[in-house]
Image (cartoon, rainbow, N blue to C red):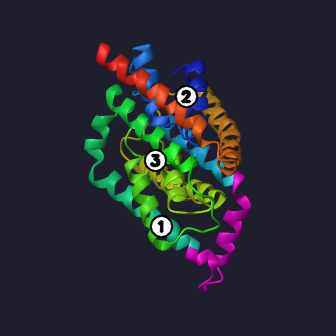
Amino acid sequence: MGIFEALILGIIQGLTEFLPVSSSGHLEIVKALFGSNAMAKESMFMTVMLHGATALSTIVIFRKEILEIVTGLFQFKWNDQTVFSLKIILSMLPAAFVGVVFADELEALFDSQILLVGFMLLLTAGLLFLADRAKTTEKGVSFWGAIVIGVAQAIAILPGISRSGATISTSVLLGVDRSKATRFSFLMVVPLILGKMAKDMLSSDFTLQGESILPVLIGFVAAFVTGLFACTWMIKLVRKSKLSYFSIYCAVVGLIAIVSSLIN
């Protein structure tokens, strides 16, 4: 993998992991545009490092909240931190179940399925449009809400559905405060990413064959830096009800993907 390709991969991962435009969908579109399977064949090590970079971005942005949660848990009491942690665990279960049980079926969907990506981007656009017009409240995430948001995250495994877009939109439509919805959406994915990283690193498929350290470092730094920017920007946009911009973007890209797929 070349340095330029690693840089592009890092920027795409850093931006689309947080912005509600679907990182998986964009990677599939990029593959189709370049007429290459290079993205699909990128090494396991690079994949792990890029996801690790965006997880680290989340941890840096929400370091105070994470420290409070960890400190509260070690008090071994039924407090706000314990309740929040249980909600995070509940939200993880649907995606973990789908990822383990339907791993082979999901893998088949990530094989240049541009038509599927196009329709899923339209679905993302619709969710963002509805969420942008939802009433502002001060409600937090309930236990039942955590499960529903977790189901949205599981569905967002499909290429073209934005994970952050699906979870934040679902939260807002459930009446959750926009800032709390964004915070919960970004924090709920960190354990899943770290768990996936651990699984990949312990897997027999994990190899460094043919991989140089420089492209990996460049990809990691690019994903981390752009992730910091995208995460901070997304928090501000959700507070100001600016999701409609991304709704229009997803709709346009989705329609282009559909038309392109039908023509080809």
Q: Residues within 10 Å of mark 2 (few under 14, many from 20)?
A: many
Mark 1 burial class by Cα count in 10 Å: few <14, some 14-19, many 20+: some
- Which badge, 1 or 2, is on the more N-terminal residue? 2
Q: Does residue 184 show up? A: yes
Q: Is residue 23 above or below residue 197?
A: above
Helix, strand or loop at label 3? It is: helix
In the picture, measured across the screen, residue 152 lies left or right of residue 49, that is: left
Which SS class for mark 2?
helix
Judged by depth in the image, the label closer to the viewer, 2 or 3, is 2
Q: Amino acid at mark 2?
A: Leu
Query: Which is nearer the eye, 82 or 53?
Result: 82
Q: Which residues are magenta?
A: 61-83
The alpha-carbon separation of the residues under discs 3 and 1 comes to 32 Å
Where 159 sits versus 71, above or below? above
Q: Residue 73's x, y, as percent?
A: 62, 77
Residue 61: percent from the left, percent from the top?
71, 52
Residue 262 versus residue 149 in the image, above or below: above
Mark 2 lies on residue: 9
Most extreme residue toward the right is: 64
Residue 56 in the magenta stretch? The answer is no
Mark sitting on residue 48: none
The numbered disc on residue 145 is 1
The Cα atoms of the two marked residues, 2 and 3, are separated by 20 Å
- The type of residue carrying mark 1 is Gly
State yes or no: residue 72 in magenta: yes
Q: Quadrant of residue 231?
A: top right
Q: Of callouts 2 and 3, which one flags the residue occurring earlier in the amino acid sequence?
A: 2
Q: Secondary structure at mark 1?
A: helix
Image disc number at residue 201: 3
Residue visible at 32% across and 54% down in the picture: 98
Magenta-highlighted stretch: main secondary structure? helix
- Please state if 214 lies on the left or on the right of 88 as rendered: right
